[in-house]
Image: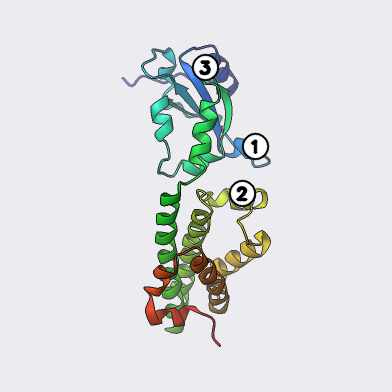
Amino acid sequence: MTTQRPLVSYDAFVEIATADPAVVGLVLKGSRAHEGMATAHSDHDLYAVLAEGAATPLTRFAGHRTPELDLVVLTLDAFRAAGMPGFERYALARARVVLDRLDGEIARILSAKARLDTDEARREAAAYLDAYANSLYRSVKNDRDGQPLAARLDAADSVRFLLEFLFALDRRPRPYNKYLHWELSRFPLPDWDTGHLLDTVAHISATGDVPAQRDLFARVERVARAAGHGAVLDGWGEDLCLMRPRQ
């Protein structure tokens, strides 16, 4: 017979964990860590961070998941590694510290996740720039060849890779789509007008508008070359002519 995990509310678990000396940190992520984003349907996504080698009955809550509380119980070393790299990185980069018994170490770990190091950012930016150019090129070709659905799908893909590229240039993990407006309205990308950028990517994603894609690429090309990524674009050779605005 399968053993049932005990059920507990968010407030009750925080109280229990705070009283347990094995717990060195509590970290809240997700909608409830993003001001103004929580709804009536939002649960509490909580990490309970344990001291290495500590014995605690809280491990019985590992994997706890209800409509109110989604709980991860892990060691300090595992918490340091979480999202590095991985899908969780952005969520942890904007997470909120509920408990830190390590004189600010939990907060420092989160801060490290929020900032790509120089080499990592350069590698990711180069890879995502190339992926953006690839999807843009395919979108424009498909539009030219009478494949409107393929053109729109490739345009939407290009927007995804473009956002990854722009955030990597700023040494930040890209936010989930749900938090893109939230992130940019509070922490704009350097030299980009947030409203215009969001309107442009929304329009391109919805329509695959080729002139709009080309106009955006002209701006991206200037930014990419100024950041030292010209070689990535030069690798496309004469195909760049199809991506650039018509004279």
* Occupied quadrant, residue 213: bottom right
Whole-Å distance between the Cαs marked 1 and 3? 25 Å
Which label number is shown at residue 183?
2
From the viewer's perspective, is the residue at label 1 or at label 3 nearer? Answer: 3
Q: Is residue 162 above or below residue 104?
A: below
Could you say whether the residue bearing mark 2 is in a helix, strand or loop? helix
For badge 3, the amino acid type reads Ala
Looking at this view, is 227 or 104 the one in front? 227
Q: Is residue 192 visible?
A: yes
Looking at this view, is 187 or 13 the one in front? 187
Q: Is residue 220 above or below residue 75?
A: below
| Residue identifier under label 3 | 17
Whole-Å distance between the Cαs marked 1 and 2? 21 Å
* Occupied quadrant, residue 99: top right
Whole-Å distance between the Cαs marked 3 and 2? 30 Å
Q: Is residue 102 above or below residue 118?
A: above
Residue drawn at (65%, 59%) of the image: 194
Residue drawn at (64%, 37%) of the image: 40
Could you say whether the residue bearing mark 1 is in a helix, strand or loop? loop
| Residue identifier under label 1 | 40
Residue drawn at (49%, 19%) of the image: 24
